[in-house]
Amino acid sequence: MRMYDIIAKKRDGGTLTRDEIAFAVNGYVAGSVPDYQMSALLMAIYLRGMTDEETAQLTDVMAHSGDMVDLSAISGVKADKHSTGGVGDKTTLVIAPIVAACGVKIAKMSGRGLGHTGGTIDKMESVPGTRTALTQEEFFRQVNDIGIAVIGQSGKIAVADKKMYALRDVTATVGCIPLIASSIMSKKLAAGSDAILLDVTVGSGAFMKNLDDAIELARLMVSIGTAHGRKVAALITDMDTPLGHNIGNSLEVAESMAVLKGEGPADLTEVCLQLASNMLYLAGKGDMPQCRAMAEHVIADGSAFDLCCRMFAAQGGDTEVLRDSEKFRKAKYSYSVCAKSAGYITANDVECIGNASVMLGAGRAKKEDPIDFAAGIVMHKKLGETVEAGEPICTFYADDPALFAPAEQMYRSGLMIGPDCPPAMPLIYARVTKDGVERF
Ligand code: URA
């Protein structure tokens, strides 16, 4: 078999066999297939697509390119969730403790920020002392003892994805449904949970810019997971505006804790409750109304917040900042971005908001860049709200005031204020299961 022939076959619209996919992927991991040949194959896949069967085979080969975690040493049903990425997307920090407080085990591996989007592990590390790298023994023990642990993804999970994702990132081949589906599902299958809820974001801050593509991605991922014997469902959620008001690591942790204390913003709270109810449903905890009631109950009685504190404490974190967000270290400087005219906010591009927060220090421009956990943005006015001329739209936080001007330019490049109220967007557009698509 030759890589040249596999590339040519896909370039000409052919369907690859499992052996051909395995030859390419395993060869790339082993180093016998060079970057330039894998790049050519990825671009051919980007342009020609893959059948569902090819995508399923690609996922399986990628999942088996590293460790397949066996969670059977943890008793009970294990649930996981994955978001396809967003800005201000802090749902894991809320949902994981809710679901665990309802008796479903959470043994979760999460990622760091990528491009303009944030990552759970960076947010967790903004809580002083928190360790996100546990040994497998510590990880399993913590889940068995308190029901929940969230850690960084081990470098040994889906090794092919790590290498291929880095290559896609620099060869303009990220935004391709079969490649995204195989990338995400290879990691989820390897991570070992029984029930997997996918949060597929759609809108200006998401990989999927339109609903049909988001539904197609969700359908494909659900079918791959189901074929591997997992319980999988996906919610299609809006990313045309960030969830809640806060963007940036400790700012987002503070807002997540507010939701767990029953004091969070309505949009974030609602999306978290819907995601948590669906996870509980997949884990067999009851019908949807019962699962929703359970999720609401563990917020109201404080048990989800208590469990979140126990998780951070078990991982070395200082829970004082969770109880009182004023105790987080504050950025040295703040700056208000004010409206230049009165009207409705008719556009507020989420990618621009995410990029602005990265420019303030909340994310990384390069992989090795440090993060300023206190940096970020608090939005006062969001898409569809009215503003007066001169009124603050958002506040920036950073340790270096020279960062404000370029970040403001980035934020304003996606901002439009006009006379007409834009149509209100739903928070959740659809639910995709193995039985089909339910649009809301
Ligand atoms: N997230 C992933 O893990 N992989 C992708 O390809 C896109 C988003």
Image: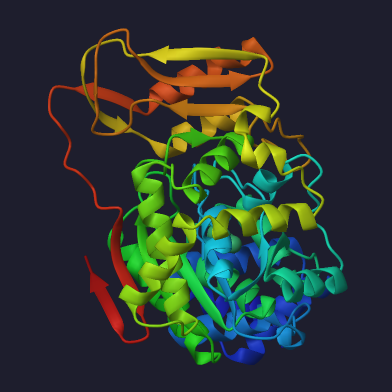
Position in image of residue 235 (x %, y %)? 37, 66
The image quarter in which residue 364 lies: top right
Position in image of residue 202 (x %, y %)? 37, 54
Position in image of residue 182 (x %, y %)? 56, 73
Looking at the image, is 109 positioned above or below residue 410?
below
Looking at the image, is 389 positioned above or below residue 349?
above
Towards the viewer: 403 or 197: 197
Q: Does the image show residue 47? A: no
Say which residue appears at 43% left-offset and 50% top-offset. Answer: 206
Towards the viewer: 370 or 125: 125
Q: How many marks?
A: 0
Q: Residue furthest top?
A: 390
Coloring scheme used: rainbow
Say which residue appears at 32% left-offset and 87% top-offset. Answer: 435
Quadrant for ligand 1?
bottom right
Instruction: Look at the image and tell me in which quarter the C terminus lies.
Output: bottom left
Q: Does the image show residue 384? A: yes
Q: Residue furthest left?
A: 420
Towards the viewer: 382 or 62: 382
302 lies left or right of 372: left
Instruction: Look at the image and tell me in which quarter the N terminus lies.
Output: bottom right
Looking at the image, is 96 positioned above or below residue 143?
above
369 lies left or right of 390: right
255 lies left or right of 111: left
Towards the viewer: 409 or 330: 330
Position in image of residue 307 (x %, y %)? 63, 59
64 lies left or right of 53: right
Say which residue appears at 72% left-offset and 34% top-offset. Answer: 371
Say which residue appears at 55% left-offset and 52% top-offset. Answer: 172
